Structure formats: C-alpha cells, structure tokens
Image (cartoon, rainbow, N blue to C red):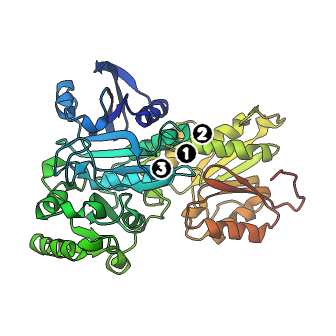
Amino acid sequence: MMDIAIIVSVQDPAGMNVRERLLARMPWHAQGAHDGSALLHAQTPLHRLLLLTAQKDTIHCEDLGSTMRALGFAADMFLFLTRHASRAGVPTMSCHAPGNWGDALQGGKKRALGIAPALWQRRAYLALVRHCPDGYDPVMEATHHGPLLDRPCLFMEIGSTGKEWVDPVAGAALASAVVQLLSIDPMSKDAEVPRIVVGLGGTHTCAEFNKAVQRYPMAVGHVCPKYALPDLDEDMLRQAIGRTMAGVDLDTGTMGVDAILLDWKGLGQEKARVMALAEEFAASHGLQVLRTDKLSTDVAPARTEESQPAPADASYYSSIASGYDDLHGDEQRAKYALVLPHIAQYSSLLDVGCGTGMLHDAWHQNIDSNGPLEVSSISKRTYCGLDPSVGLIEQGVRAGRKGLQVGSAEALPFADDSFDVVVSFTALHHCADVETAVAEMARVARTRIVISSLRRAKAASAIEAEVRRRWPDCVALHDEKDDVFVCDVSGAGFDVEN
C-alpha cells in the first residue's frame, strides 16, 4: 500500500476548486493541522492519502519532504492539483512532472529535474482523456517549474485562464480523473507494462507524445520541449533518464527508462545535435532511440482505445471495482436522468454492460432530474444486469443490488422478447463485435432499446451507424460525453421530443 500526499494551495483557485470536488467524492477525516489548515486523511484499497492545503504556491513548496517526515507520513509520491497558465488561453486538463531545463524562474533549482513517475503520468493522462469536459483539451505538458523534491511528483492541472480555474465542471472532471488514478495500481503485476521513455522536442503541450501514449503501450517521463533544447546536454539527458522512474518504488534503484523518444518534426535547428546526442547516449547505456514518425513500425499498438484509461476489458474493471461507483457514479446517474422519463412506463429491464448495477437503484426508485416519476407499477418492476467483469458484479451484489450476473453482450443468455426495455450505457464500444451485440439486444427486447455511445470512442461511428441502420426513426439525446439513442422495436412508434 502506497502513501500519496495530495497538495493544493490556498493561493491557487484551480487547486481549491478541485479540492472542493474531491472532498465530496471520497470519505475524508480530519486529523491534525499544518500551516493553519486541517490535514485530511483517506484510504482506498490501494493507497493511504493525505490532503494538505499549503499557504504558499505549490511550485515553491520545497520543504514538503521535511514536512512529511515531521508528520510521520511516508509520502511515496506527491500529487499536486493546480492551475496551468498560458498566453494562448486554450482550456486544458493537463499533467506533467516538475523540473527546470535551464534557469529556475518558477521554483525548483537551475538545471535540476524532479523524479517523474512515468507509469503514473501515463495513467493520469489517460484519466484526463476519459474525463475531460467538452471544450477542454487533455494534454501532457513538458517538464517545467518547481518544486524540487526527493520523491516522485506529478502535477494535474486546469488551464489556462482564471475562467477555467474556477469552472465547477472542470473541477469536477479533474476530481474524477484523480479518483480514477487513485483506484488503480500502475505497478501491479497484472498491469500493462509499457515502454518507458523520455521525450525530446515538440510543443510544450506534447502534441506528438500525447498521440504516442494513446496509441501505443508507452509511458513518458520527463519531456524537454523544442524551446528548451538549447539547454539539453549530456548532463541534462542523464538527469532526465535517471530521474524518470517506472513507478515510485525508490528502494529498487531501477532506472526504468528503455528508450529516448524524439518528436522528429519538433526538433527544429537542434535536430542534428540532439539526434547525435541521443544516439551516442543510447548506445553507451543500452537504450533505444525512437522517432514519432516511425512508431507504427517500431512499436506494437496498445491494447487500449484512445478514449480509455486502461485496457478496456473485464480484468481492468475488476481491478477498480471497489471504487467504480465513486469513479463513474455522477456521469452514469446523469444519463439515467436523461433516459428514465422515456422508459419509466415499462416493467422489465435488461442492463447490458451494467457495471456494478447502479441503474438498479434508479430503476426501482424511479427518479429523474425533476424528482420521483409517477409510475403505477413500481412494485412489479424487475431489473436484470449483465456484465463481463466478475469484480464489478461482485461489487454490485455487495451493495445489495439484485438481478446481477456475469455474461457477454454478444451472447445474451435470455429467450427472445424477454424484456420490455434493453439498455446499454457507455459499454458497447468495449465489444469486439458491435453488430452482434446490437442484434442480441434487439432479439431479447420487446419494446424499447436505449444505447448510449461515448463520442470519443473509436467505435462511436460504428455504433451509431448500426443503430440507425436498424432503427432509422430512433431519437437521439445528448449528454456531456455520450450520444444516447432511444429506439422503438415494437413497431408501435413513440412520442419523444428530440
């Protein structure tokens, strides 16, 4: 079990925004105080957490190591929740490691890099991709600013102006990404083991490295952007590699990095020098030099979809089962509120890809965004939920939800016309055969089918095409991240406002 210190600052409106949302997402208890603020503690199945609110800006919190020792908290890693500022003003959700390639203009020390936990940064970035609200760009950033500490550090930020820093939607999204990050263990023996690289070149917001992490099993630690390449020499490259860790287990002494990744079109006038430096260093240290323009031939694709935070399979969801409701509860309940008014008159429901069966509660409570629904057949309603993840089903059963079972959307274990309504919320993009899954839903449904599709998913267009092919008159609803299709399969038609 790891000890993770989460740091925010009273001087940082974005950090305080996320802090407020995070307090509502997890059970915290106050124990002690520091610098005029209560110390808040929480524990997940994997981590012990300490939430510390600093009085000074986080980039200048160079004394956190001694503070943690005085508090008796090991702090295997520091997670900073902060603001990101840029003149461009593009709304972003970002993550990065701290350090300075040149002068220390914003905390830290001159030409000194912190410890970058590459696997955690990969998971953080993919969590941001998953939870990023519309209008924001999820990005990694190049290594920059302080503080300089003796433990791995990761910043997760809201950018890029005062408007975004206090946006409650952005605060909630970053809090959700943090909860997701804390619900997994990137160092687990069952976790995907990606290539660990340092990145050289490109933009501050790592345009090419973002693509690499989404498309390939690759974790990026320190990044030296194009504008900082004049400061890159053998000493700084050695620091970047030596202080990029696979995880946060400092006792192993393992360097972790196995390749240097070049943004081939983002090296500018430094290309020849940086290429020679990288190749010479790699040859003498047993590393590989990779280029962003040749990754498709040099590295096998990742198992993950661009929109997913981790392998989109039953084993991944089983690994986060204990925190699933906290992680996905708000977004799922928002979809239920959108859909329930259009299916509330029916009695039996099948939930395909049900997760822990959260819809069970809403179905039996008959609640939408405006309060209780007037339904006369509440006492006779039946719910059945099916999911391929054993862990999620077991978690739902522990929560007291009935009618849950393990199974596959592509082979539903039910007779034809078994349910009034068949729904699938943000699940079909995990199916290997979307067409078969939709056909199975149609086979067991008597009256209505509801399918929500994550717009960011690679399979989104295929899902919509199959739905509209079968039911051209389906009604499309929309929430923050999903397109929701309400389909009549009885032939009687329905009256639903689009």
Residue, x 55% and y 69% (percent of image)?
Answer: 432
Closer-to-camera residue (474/279): 279
Distance of label 3 from label 2 (alpha carbons): 46 Å
Residue 343 can be seen, yes or no:
no
**What element does badge 2 sit on?**
loop
- Residue 50: give x, y in percent of width and height: 31, 31
Residue, x 53% and y 38% (percent of image)?
Answer: 167
Residue 233 can be seen, yes or no:
yes
Q: Residue furthest left?
A: 284
Return the mark for residue 356: 1
What quarter of the picture does the N terminus occupy?
Answer: top left
Image side of residue 327 versus residue 152, left or right:
right
**What element does badge 3 sit on?**
loop
- Residue 367: give x, y in percent of width and height: 72, 35
**What element does badge 1 sit on?**
loop
Residue pointed to by mark 3: 89
Residue pointed to by mark 2: 401
